[in-house]
């Protein structure tokens, strides 16, 4: 839904590619952006996982409208645009019902992104369903993120990831983050878990730029925490253990 590029906790990390992407009426995109890359050590709002502010930049490609809806064609164009811009990580907190045609279209877009060096991370969805029934969550080649709660259990709303190629979990319940006009809100969703995993991937790639999507997921999975619902949720991503593993 875009990003409020002038938000006090995002503007120092924000890279604009088109002016029309730098606004967010709905708030979803700004909230996700804060989780992924809020400025650290500025005594404002929240902090992302990065130890300092020189590890990452965040940008926006607006593929959903001000009411949070969009088309598969628009989303795929966004994937291609991000890939052509040379982005390392594409984070997509969105989704819809799966069918053969949508699977094929998304798969081709993801393959294109991989060819350009991108890692694609997507939300599992919030239907309390199997993520295999949703796109892009079920598309081969993406890292699919479920949401867990503060009790380290699969959130009641979260889709499960046991049937997708690469499933992982992250916190997604009662998550405080940025909201337009220098405000902050707590929201729930796999939408909130996804940018957390994207941030971990960005941190890992800043240390080892040669990590591709397969090796990134392997590291996340191997170093992840096997929570009680891990068969349905996937292992919970553990940033510090992942970075230690890269160092070895």
Image: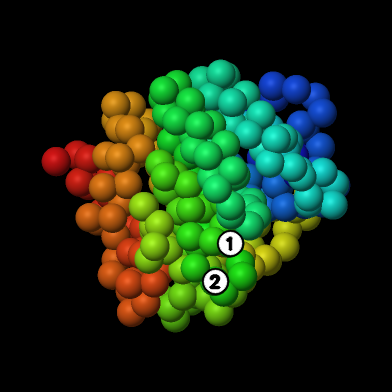
Image quarter of the N terminus: top right
**Which residue is depicted at the point 68% across and 41% down?**
72
Residue indicated by mark 2: 129
Q: Residue furthest front?
A: 100
Between disc 2 and disc 1, the foreground one is 2
- Please tell me which residue is depicted at 61% across the width and 67% down the height of the picture: 126
**Helix, strand or loop at mark 2:** loop
| 128 versus 66 height, above or below | below
Location of residue 235 in the rendering, given as x and y in whole percent from the top left corner: 33, 64
Within the image, what quadrant is residue 22 found in? top right
Quadrant of the snapshot with the C terminus: top left
| Crowdedness near tag 2: few (<14), some (14–19) or many (≥20) residues, C-alpha within 10 Å | some
Dot 2 and dot 1 residues touching (CB under 8 Å): yes
Q: Position of residue 142 (x, y in %)?
A: 44, 44
Relative to 128, does residue 204 appear above or below in the rendering? above
Number of the label disc, if any, that sits on residue 125: 1
Local secondary structure at mark 1: loop
Locate residue 76 relative to residue 121 in the image: left or right: right
Q: Position of residue 14 (x, y in %)?
A: 65, 31
Q: Is residue 178 left or right of residue 47?
A: right
Q: Residue at x 70, y 35 (%)?
A: 73
Where residue 165 sits in the image (x, y, percent)?
Answer: 36, 52
Instruction: Tell me which residue sits at (31%, 51%) in the image.
Output: 220
Camera sees residue 240: no
For the residue pair 88 and 138, the one nearer the viewer reads as 138
Figure quadrant of residue 114: top left
Most foreground residue, 153 or 75: 75
What number is the disc on residue 58? none
Q: Quadrant of residue 223?
A: bottom left
Left or right, 159 with reference to 76: left
């Amino acid at each position: 839904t875009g990003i409020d590029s002038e938000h006090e906790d995002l503007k120092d990390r924000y890279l604009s590619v088109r002016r029309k992407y730098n606004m967010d009426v709905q708030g979803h995109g700004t909230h996700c952006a804060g989780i992924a890359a809020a400025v650290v050590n500025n005594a404002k709002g929240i902090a992302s996982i990065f130890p300092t502010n020189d590890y990452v930049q965040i940008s926006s490609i607006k593929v959903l409208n001000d009411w949070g809806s969009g088309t598969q064609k628009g989303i795929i164009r966004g994937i291609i645009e991000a890939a052509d811009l040379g982005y390392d990580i594409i984070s997509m907190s969105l989704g819809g019902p799966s069918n053969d045609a949508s699977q094929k279209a998304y798969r081709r877009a993801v393959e294109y992104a991989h060819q350009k060096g991108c890692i694609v991370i997507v939300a599992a969805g919030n239907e309390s369903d199997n993520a295999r029934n949703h796109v892009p969550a079920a598309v081969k080649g993406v890292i699919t993120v479920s949401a867990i709660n503060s009790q380290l259990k699969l959130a009641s709303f979260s889709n499960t990831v046991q049937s997708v190629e690469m499933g992982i979990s992250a916190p997604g319940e009662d998550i405080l983050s940025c909201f337009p006009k220098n405000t902050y809100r707590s929201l729930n969703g796999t939408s909130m878990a996804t940018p957390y995993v994207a941030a971990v991937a960005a941190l890992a790639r800043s240390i080892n730029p040669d990590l591709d999507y397969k090796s990134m997921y392997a590291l996340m999975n191997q170093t992840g925490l096997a929570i009680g619902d891990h068969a349905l949720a996937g292992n919970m991503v553990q940033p510090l253990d992942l970075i230690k593993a890269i160092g070895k």
